[in-house]
Image (spheres, helix red, strand yellow):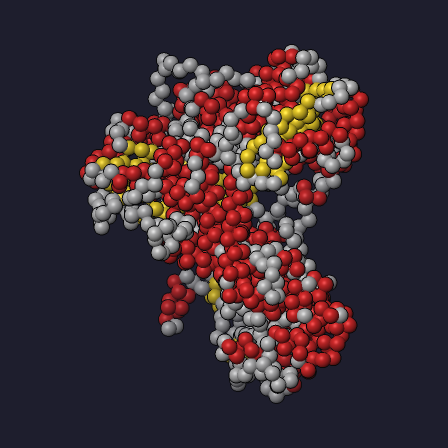
Amino acid sequence: MAQPLLDNIAAFDLSMLLPQGIPTLEATLTKNYTRPDNIFASTDIADRLLTCDTAPALRPPCTDHLPISLSLDVTPHPARETPRRNFREVDWEDFRTCLKGNIDSRMLGHGELTTLEQFNVVLKNLSDAISETIKATVPLSRPPPFTKRWWSQDLAKSRRAVQRLARVSYKHRNTHDHPSHAEYRKIRNRYGDEIKSAKQDHWEAWLESADPDSIWTINRFTAAGPSDGSRPRVPSLKDGNAPAAEENEAKSGILYRAFFPPPGPPPSLPATHRYPKLAFHFSPITDEQIAAAVKRLKELKVPGPDEASNEVYKHCIDLLLLHLGRLFRATFTLNTYPSEWKISNTAALRKPGRPDYAVAKAYRPIALLNCIGKILSACVADVLVYESETHGLLARNHFGGRPGRCSTDSLHLLVKTVKDAWRRGQVVSILFLDIKAAFPSANLERLFHNMRSRGIPKEIVNWLRQRLTGRHTRILFDDFKSALFEIINGIDQGCPLSVILYEFYNSDLFEIAYRIPHSFALGYIDDAAIIATGKDYIETHEILRRYMDEEGGAMTWSNEHQSEFSLDKFGLLNMSAMSPDLGPSLQLQTANIQPLEAHKFLGVTIDRRLRFHQQVAGALAKGFAWVQQFRRLARTSGGIPFSHMRRLYLSIAVPRILYAADVFLVPLRNVPGRKSTYGSVGAIKKLARVQRQATLLIMGAMRTTASDVLEAHANLLPFALLIDKHCHRAAVHLCTLPPSHPLHVHVKKASARYIKHHRSPLHELLETYQLDPDKTETISPIRYSPSWSPSFQVSVADSKDSALKEEARWAEKHGIRVYSDGSDIDSGVGAAAVLYRGDRANPKVLRFYLGKSSEHTVYEAEVVGFILGVKLIHSEFVVYSASCAGDNKASVRATRLRRPAPSHYLLDVLHRDVDLLIRKHKIGKSALTVRWVPGHKDVEGNERADLEAKKAARGDPSPLAMLPKSLQSPLPLSSSKLRQSHLECLKSKAATAWKGSERGHAFSRIDPSLPSPKFEKLVADLPRRHASLLIQLRTGHAPLNVHLHRIKCSPTKLCPACNGRPESVQHFLLSCPSYRRQRDVLTQELGRPARSLAKLLTSPRAVKPLFRYIHATGRFSTVFNHLNTFDKCRHARA
């Protein structure tokens, strides 16, 4: 065994550093000292040796080895982390005051910028004003302390005592019976226990003090998996056959070459290519666009090289908007883009789940951009998205990053295409493509050519040329920031423009299928699937070969766009309804693609028979992985409070498990004439196991507790109904798709007939919920251009008092005042508007009945009220100014939104009617104001509108001829109301099933309100240990002998205190004679409720006295402890 060590010592010329005669181990039994440990080093390290000796005083608990202290003369070069600005602690009032002073002192002017000199001066002054304000008002982040957070003064005192006794014990090491050895061992073991206890106490204190914000930090720590607590580092990187890079400069070079591959030869673009007619004309960016882009910025994101966080612009946009607008417009008119906006930081982030992080491809580049440049890019991206959707400039089956489309839409289209082919007796072959470094390898000249070929104005393309050329970046990893690298090629990942630009770049790839019969291409950004249908695999493979290899095919696209395919990552599925085997391989010119049993596409494992067994297994594994990860956050005796655990489950675990559930699961339903339940019964039963484990974790209940009891207390839908809720939402979304969506035709066909064979998820969803797309509202992907603004003023006062003062001013004007309202009463929804003018005795009134409460919302009625109000104003002979007041803030604010949302078609009608009103009466935008007035404040017009709206809701509308034309036909069903009504139906089903069950009937004597949020409210202010014990007492599954004996954990069911009767919950709380004295105290506090089990376990007033009684009995002290204190941070140390 020693020979390999001797061989290495000789081969590497190693020498022993620890001097002879120094023992390194004290035997546990004999207490003899021996020397099993040695230290060998090469000549270079041996020359740097200062000292090498054992350090008995530093000997840790639970080991018989002595630490060896080694000192080398090595000059360290510690990484110095640059302090960051802490934008969380900014006083924004002070910041705004300082910024305004800095801007005013620089005299930035107000007109548009017409020369580069003006542009550079304004840019420099504005940047300096922001930078100086940040330096003056934003504090630096304090570095975290090096000591452990769980450390305390008591532990420091114990450590000093252990070290002192260690020195004494070592001094007397040759005297085996010296008392210092026993004392040292005793103190050392106690010290180890104190460390464990301190860590546990601090962990529990942190968990129990969690609030709605900090639970996401806890989630991030827990989801990261096990680690040593340190920050992940970039190890030595391998670069082909070259030696591994050790220095950060060399690592940054390897990462740079991986993130930004060198461009190939210039694309062969025709010199005399004639581009088509422009799809739209360029319009300058408006201040409203900039304000909207700033409003969408996410808070507390890492800033770019300018160190200006998004918060600066969100809090100060009113001070900066004028100057940002001038600068942004000048970048187009002057054909310039500042070099400082082209400098970025590129963070190297680990790709999760990679086997080897010593290679550069295991890291992902994320661009941290200059914030002003990022806002400008967002404005341009808004224009490109709107115009590309309006004019159909992108490939029809491109789903990623486009408004009104999601990844599950493409999955539905894929499955529907396969099922349709099977129904025709055909087979299907699907080839899944993969592109290496899709964004970084994009050739810019080819991108500009593609955009011009699709009708993008030259002004935008030239601006993009300025934006994307001459870029530089620094690679960031660990504590290192590299020198500047030049970015010659590619699209910045993390830039608002990245997705829409790449869609222009690779749309040609999807359109290749347009000219190949029986082929179909769909994708999501850089993920693509090519579908071929035919009578056999010979035909489908020939179609795929044509798509890939023929002139103008995918390989041609790859060469022209310098986007190399990862052929080893291609996936091939041969899909037949009958064939039992995988089918033949696909032979391409450059590779042979082997068929697979299943392939993951857009996060869903698609198998060749579309049975989704692998996907269900993957979802189940995700669910159990979440439970295992979060089990350490919530134990019965401590941890995250009940409400926070419930929130984590619904917001993290459920979306993971049920992602694309509408594709791979069929919701359960009873079919007439069929005995068994129809749907994915087996799969849903499997997945329901996750919810059972999660509810046990959430509630802190014993494992024997029934699932329906847990779900009723947690106010969770049974898992089958939870899937029903998810699938119904997806079905409603499908019914709202506009004709421009690729799924629209398929949805209409699926809703028309429920076929017998090879039903797709679309058929199952629409049949299950009996939804009709023709009767449901359509939600368009886009509504108005980014530069759009409403043709009227919108006024929402800050408070009710301010709104009432504004109402008084309008009343004094003696002009036109319209009041509108919506009402949901007596199962009907109605809207009304009343018009007052001057001293006119009777106001004009219009009423409209929308429909049933199960089909329409009050929000819709409020918008309809505005439409009726505009109709009343339109009918006036003379209009100079007018206001339309409603008491619903959401509907008033929605009138200035341009993005799609449920019921937006009514807002579009409102805007069209206002435009007609303005043209008829020749008034300006300032002549009409839509404003908010508080309801039920004795405002005459609002009270009258409320009364008329109730009449309309009860079925008393105005004559049809008096209504606007847009309201003379029935309104489509509201998607929001369809979801709300179905959720209420599911809750009613769950309640009915619970109350009709044996356990539900038994529980009605304790808490008849279940299922409800009542229990969550009851334990909201209690530590987790109290909530856990309370649910155990309510369910009867508690550590009392009746239950313990039932589960064979106790030899007897008799009460250990009185030894007379079985120890049930009722006996323990109400009748055990041994606890008579404690029960008398409880009775003094509560009175008669102390003799009622239902009152004790459900009344908020009884909770704390109950736990004081339980604590006084000492019955659960070994598990729960401290039940007489209700401080959630009981473990916190000073």
From the viewer's side, name the closer residue of 211 and 937.
937
Q: Is residue 517 left or right of residue 324?
A: left
Where residue 395 sits, quadrant-wise, is top left
The percent position of residue 323, horizontal first and vertical second, equals 67, 23
From the viewer's side, name the closer residue of 389 and 1097.
1097
From the viewer's side, name the closer residue of 883 and 488.
883
* Residue shown at the point (67%, 41%) measured from the top left: 87
The percent position of residue 564, horizontal first and vertical second, equals 35, 35
- Image quadrant in which the C terminus is located: bottom right
The percent position of residue 1115, horizontal first and vertical second, equals 64, 77
The percent position of residue 770, horizontal first and vertical second, equals 42, 41
- Image quadrant in which the N terminus is located: bottom left
**666 vs 6: above or below:** above
Task: Confirm whether residue 57 shows in the render.
Answer: no
* Residue shown at the point (71%, 23%) measured from the top left: 843
**64 vs 859: above or below:** below
Q: Residue furthest bottom?
A: 177
Task: Confirm whether residue 919 shows in the render.
Answer: yes
* Residue shown at the point (61%, 36%) measured from the top left: 954
Numbered marks: total: 0
Q: Is residue 592 left or right of residue 125?
A: left
* Residue shown at the point (65%, 57%) measured from the top left: 1017
Q: Is residue 694 left or right of residue 523?
A: right
